[in-house]
Image: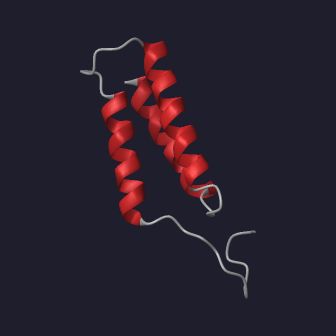
Amino acid sequence: MSNGERGKYQFVVSKKSWKALKQKLKTITRKTTPMSFDERIQKLNEVQRGWVNAFRMASILNKLQELDGWIRNRLRY
């Protein structure tokens, strides 16, 4: 379903869920958390895969692209 299609229902993810996901990703990408870069990437993949599977019916493509940029930025620090 495309974004904003008239006459169609769309599933959306609540702000509370986005905030919880971002907080979880923030703890993983935190530099003070002792783990190697590969472990960090593996953990990020696990969390993201589970979250996307849980909300796969929702229209979240744009938000995921924003989140991707945010995560890449945090990993670059």
Figure check: 66 above or below 7: above
Could you say where residue 15 lies in the image, as x and y percent from the top left?
40, 64
Task: Name the image quarter holding the N terminus.
Answer: bottom right
Could you say where residue 72 lies in the image, as x and y percent from the top left?
49, 32
Name the residue furthest top: 36
Compared across the picture, whether 74 is left or right of 13 comes to left
Write the residue at 50% across / 64% down.
13
Residue 5 figure quarter = bottom right
Compared across the picture, whether 14 is left or right of 45 comes to left
Figure check: 69 above or below 38: below
Could you say where residue 8 lies in the image, as x and y percent from the top left?
72, 82
Figure check: 17 above or below 53: below
Q: How is the image coloured?
A: secondary structure
**How many numbered callouts?**
0
Name the residue furthest bottom: 7
Decide if residue 65 is in sight here.
no
Decide if residue 13 is in sight here.
yes
Could you say where residue 14 lies in the image, as x and y percent from the top left?
44, 66
Residue 9 figure quarter = bottom right
Write the residue at 74% across / 69% down.
2
Task: Name the image quarter holding the C terminus.
Answer: top left
Write the residue at 55% across / 68% down.
12
Figure check: 58 above or below 6: above
Write the residue at 43% across / 21% down.
40
Query: Of residues 27 and 54, which is closer to you in this image?
Result: 54
